[in-house]
Structures are given as structure tokens and as C-alpha cells.
Image: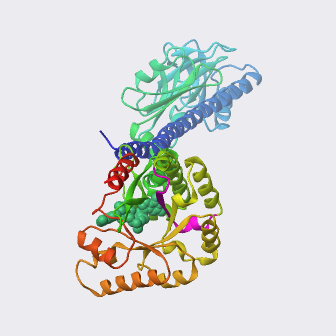
Amino acid sequence: MATRRTRLLVVAAMLGCLAFATPVSVTMYMAWQRGHEDADASLDLLASHILRRAAMLRFQSNAAIDRLVAGGVQEACTVDDLDQMRRAAASSGYMQGIGRMRGNWLQCSSLTGNTPTDLGAPDRSYPLPGSPLAWDRVRLPRIDHTRFAVTARAGYAVLSLPELVSDIPLPPGAVVGQFATGDRKVMRASGDIDSEWLQHFSGKNTSFEDSQGRWVAIKLSDLGYTAAVAAMPASLVMTYVYNAAIGLLPVGLAIGSALLAIVLWRTHYLLSIGARLKRALRRREFHLVYQPVMNLRTNRCEGAEALIRWSPPDEQGMSPTAFIPAAERHGLIQQVTAQVMDIVARDAVTLIMAFPDIHIAINFSAEDLHSVETEARLLALLNLAGAQSHNIMIEATERGLMKPEKAKDFLMSIRARGFKVAIDDFGTGHSSLSYLATYELDVLKIDKMFVDSFEQESPTTKVAFHIIEMARALGLEMIAEGVETEHQRDVLRDAGVHYAQGWLFAKPMPIAELAAFIRSTNDS
Ligand SMILES: Nc1nc2c(ncn2[C@@H]2O[C@H](COP(=O)(O)O[C@H]3[C@@H](O)[C@H](n4cnc5c(=O)[nH]c(N)nc54)O[C@@H]3COP(=O)(O)O)[C@@H](O)[C@H]2O)c(=O)[nH]1
């Protein structure tokens, strides 16, 4: 079964990918959209340009014809008539010439003079006043290399160059043109107009991607009889997308990185010992084991030290040597001690009923000794367990005693109530001796380090004997910790140490086993 840590890492990896990929994908999508919008806008501009030029040509043609008609009907194709038409054509930059029409014949023109030319059937007619007719590509006599667009109305014909409308600066690969909306015939174009594009036209402005990935826009003229078409290759569209991405992607990357950092930070936090301890406190994952304290003279069990254990579900258990300092660092130790007291209160009920003189030792950290709530919790514990104060011993480590101004009043107060106070790990810190002078204590716990020294003579052995001497002189009871051999037990007993705990007698055990242990040990 996957551990909680593995599950958390898997979820965090998935969330991290999602947190990073989502804004990046969204901005890439936005860049794609914006790129296409920009391509659209660029094509729309080109199409508008063409339509504007075509409208200008139409406007100038109509104005010139209207002026000629208003000038009074004179005989067609006379010298004066040709002269008048030349002057009218010269008034506009778009018109190349003006001529006289009869049926489909260009009778004469300012460009060709009096050379009648059959234009053939017109390419289209417009349902406008005067029913204008249009020819798209007309060849005129003596003008070999040029094709003209011809529009005829009211007996006059305007000759123009198709290129003047479509000859505009284009981005590389782009194509523009103008076609008649009725027959979808291309009137003029710069580049090749694909018939597929015109099939797409449904009478409205539109833009689309063709089968070759080219982006195409079609825009209707004001009158609606013609439309401009503009297209660009896929590579050019991608340039617009790329340019949009340059602006947007850094934003996506920044947001993605920030979200990823939040996921990583949160994961790191959830995996941190602080978060795990908070969860353990919430879920009440701690339990206690009890290590018997033996009277070395009578070989009877007279008490037990409550030792915390943490075995989280789906996770490896952790030693209190690791998580107690972590709880102290993260400001959680008081909550841990409060849960220890709750468990002792629950465990002690039957034990104290069966053994009214038994004591249970509880380990207190510095913060516990400095808090006003601790005394209230101790009194509540007595209440809940139906215990007397002599049933509870407080074990304070040397670190807990480092601030006498904070710990002294508390220790005095609880001693006055009858609780016993022990100094734990004596001799392992810097100021052990000064604590003996500062505090009124009941018990000195001889650290395992000194007990171990009895196995092999060393300077520590001498210190151990001095500690025992000093405790005796101060009238303190002594409990030796970590007694593992009979030799250690005998040395301690002979030196006058009253109590001992250690694997020689028993390892820490659950409360149910402790009662059985006391019964069997004390009855034998
Ligand atoms: N603030 C709190 N501190 C607590 C609490 N419960 C435990 N602790 C402190 O954690 C340290 C490690 O404790 P633990 O792993 O439980 O080890 C204890 C004994 O199991 C161990 N021991 C006892 N006899 C022997 C032995 O013969 N050999 C051997 N190798 N180890 C032995 O010693 C530890 C008891 O230490 P002490 O408290 O100094 O008497 C430890 O510092 C605990 O104090 C808690 O609830 N709150």
C-alpha cells in the first residue's frame, strides 16, 4: 500500500504539472487566438484598402461622366468631344481615359482616338441608376501590353488599370483581389486567387482557414456588388501567433512558476515535521508506553515513566528523540504534553484504583514549565484519573530549568500541591549543579551515560559516584536510568541509589501490560 508521503508526492506532482501547465497553455491558446485576430485585422486592412480604391475609382468615374453629360450632348467623337474627354480623364489619378460607347462598341476614346473597338459582351452589369456595364480585361488597339477595366454608363466609358486598385504593398506571401459577388468572377488581383476561397463566400464578411492552411478574409464593398479577398500563408499567420506569444507567454510562465512554487511550498510544508505533528495532534495519533521504575531494595515496581510514541497510519513511526525537539521548535510541545496528560488521565484510572501508591512520571519540556495552563491541566488530570498528587511525578529536563524566573514559581506551586518533581538527564547539561541550588526538587534522575560507565571504570564513573553522593547529601531521591545489566543494578544499589529503570527490569510497555507487570513483580 502506498504510504501517505508517496500519495502526497504523487498528488503534488500532478498538481504541480497542472499548476504550471494550465496558465502556460491558456496563454499559448490566447497567443494563438490573438495571432489569428491580428492576421484577420491585417487581412481586413488589405481588403479595406482595395475596396477604398475601388470606391474612389467608381466615385471619380461617376463624377467625370456626370460632368460630361451635364456639359450638354455634343456630337460623339469629334475633336472637341475627344478633347473634353481627355481633360475629364486627366482630372483623376485613377482614370486612364474616357470614351464614347454605343452598344458594346467603344467608338472612340481619349486613349485610342477614333478607332472603334468591339468590347464584346460585358462581364457584368450593375443594377444601379444608368445600369452601368463592366468589362474586366479589355485589350485596346495599339496598346499591346496593357489590359483595361472598362465601366460604361450614359454612353460614356471609363478606362482604368486594374492594377491601380490591387497594387498595394503586401506582406510576403499575401494575396489580394476583388471579385464580383454575383458571378464570383475575379475582377482584379495581385497574386493568384484560389477558387476555393470564392466558394467559401456566402454573401457576408468572413474569414477562414483554407485546405492548405492559408488564412483568408473576404470583405463586401459598400454596395455589395463586389468584395475584396485577402489571404496570407500559414507561415505568416504563425509569425503573428509568435509575436503574440512573445508578449503573452512570459505572463503564463510567470503565473505558472508562481503557482508551481505555491504547490512546492505547500507540499514541502505538508511533508515537514511541523505540519505532520499538527496533523498528528488533530488526529490524536500519539499513544503512551510505560517503563516500570523499580525499588532497588525491595525489587518492587513503585512507579512508571510515561513515554510518548507516534505511529502514524501509512507512515513510518518516529522516535521521540526526533519529534519532541521538533515539536519544541514548532511551538507545539504544549499541545503534545496536553495530549500526554489526557492519555495518562485515561490510563491511570484503573491502575491507581488497583495500586493507590503507584506514581506515573510525565516528561515536561521548557514551555510546559513556563505556562500557566500546565498547573490547571495537572489538576484536571488528577480529577479525571481519580488520582492524588503523589501519584504524579513531573520530570523536567535541564533545558526546561534554564530560565528559573519562568520555571521556579510553577515548580514551587506544584510541589506545594504534593506533586513530586524530578530533574531528568542530570549531569548532561552545563548548569546541573546550579539547578540543584536554584530549585527545590524531590528526585534526581541519574542519566544512562553515568549508569553505562559502571561497566568499565572511567572518569565518568567517578563523576557518577559524586552525583550519587551529592544527591544523598541534598536529601534527594535517586532514580537511575537505562539499567541494562545486573552489575549496574548492584553497583547502584550498593551506592545507595533507591530506584532504577531500564531494560534489565522491563522495556516500556502498554498500560494493560504494566498492570500485569506490577502485579506479578510485587506479588512474587
Ligand atoms: N517532553 C516529552 N519528552 C518525552 C516524552 N516521552 C519521551 N520523551 C523523551 O524522548 C526521549 C526518548 O525517549 P524514548 O525513545 O522513549 O527513550 C526512553 C526509554 O525508552 C529509554 N530507555 C529506558 N531504559 C533503557 C535502557 O535500558 N536502554 C536503552 N538503550 N534505553 C532505555 O530511555 C528514554 C528515557 O529517557 P528519559 O526521559 O530521559 O528517562 C527521552 O529524552 C524522553 O525523555 C513525552 O511524553 N514528553
Q: Position of residue 432 (x, y in %)?
A: 47, 81
- Residue closer to the observer: 473 or 373: 473
Give the answer, above or below, for where 248 lies relative to 127. Answer: below
Q: Which residues are magenta?
A: 355-371
For the N terminus, give its image quadrant: top left
Q: Position of residue 303 (x, y in %)?
A: 43, 59
Give the answer, above or below, for where 246 lies relative to 50. Answer: below
Ligand 1 placement by image quarter: bottom left
Q: Position of residue 305 (x, y in %)?
A: 43, 60
- Residue closer to the observer: 142 or 354: 354
Left or right for 523, reference 435: left
Left or right for 281, reference 307: right
Answer whether residue 419 is visible to the viewer in this image.
Answer: yes
Q: Quadrant of residue 222?
A: top right
Check the image and tell me how it is coloured: rainbow
Answer whether residue 249 is visible to the viewer in this image.
Answer: no
Question: Measuring 72% from the left and 20% from the top, which residue is drawn there?
Answer: 74
Residue 28 among magenta residues = no
Question: Measuring 68% from the left and 29% from the top, which residue is drawn there?
Answer: 59
Task: Count every numbered label the image shows and give the total.
Answer: 0
